Amino acid sequence: MQLTVKLFAYFRDNRFKQQQMEFPDDTTVEDIIVSLGIPLDELGVLMINSRHCELKQVPVEGDQVAIFPNIGGG
């Protein structure tokens, strides 16, 4: 299946901002994140088509997956 993957903040460093990518049909959001080398403990918000999603959710053809890191501040 073809998905649009969007990365935010420092997840873009040495990666990309937005990219069309091909994945097997049963790929989870977690599988996508792991394939990009993003540490799971640094995850903040995950979205599919602008709606909050979970790591084990499986997107479908044409979906847009957005991956945000944890943001901290003082």
Image: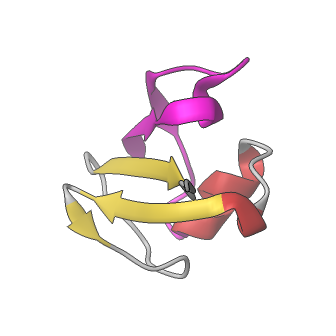
Of the 4 image quadrants, the one containing the C terminus is bottom right
Taking the spot 62% from the left edge, 36% from the top edge, the residue there is 11
Q: Which residues are magenta?
A: 1-28
Taking the spot 70% from the left edge, 59% from the top edge, the residue there is 42
Q: Position of residue 9 (x, y in %)?
A: 52, 33
Q: Position of residue 35 (x, y in %)?
A: 74, 48
Instruction: Looking at this view, name the residue that lies furthest to the left.
Output: 50
Is residue 40 visible in this depiction of the protein?
yes
Does residue 18 show up magenta in the picture?
Answer: yes
Q: Relative to residue 34, is residue 23 drawn left or right?
A: left
Q: Nearer the viewer, residue 35 or 62?
A: 35
38 relative to 20, above or below = below
Q: Relative to residue 16, is residue 38 drawn left or right?
A: right
Q: Quadrant of residue 72?
A: bottom right
Q: Position of residue 17 (x, y in %)?
A: 47, 22
Taking the spot 39% from the left edge, 48% from the top edge, the residue there is 66
63 relative to 12, above or below = below
Taking the spot 53% from the left edge, 54% from the top edge, the residue there is 71
Q: Nearer the viewer, residue 2 or 68?
A: 68
Is residue 27 visible in this depiction of the protein?
no
Instruction: Looking at this view, name the residue that lies furthest to the front.
Output: 74
Q: Relative to residue 11, is residue 3 drawn left or right?
A: left
Q: Relative to residue 41, is residue 27 drawn left or right?
A: left
How many numbered discs? Answer: 0
Q: Which colour style is shown?
A: secondary structure
Does residue 23 show up magenta in the picture?
Answer: yes
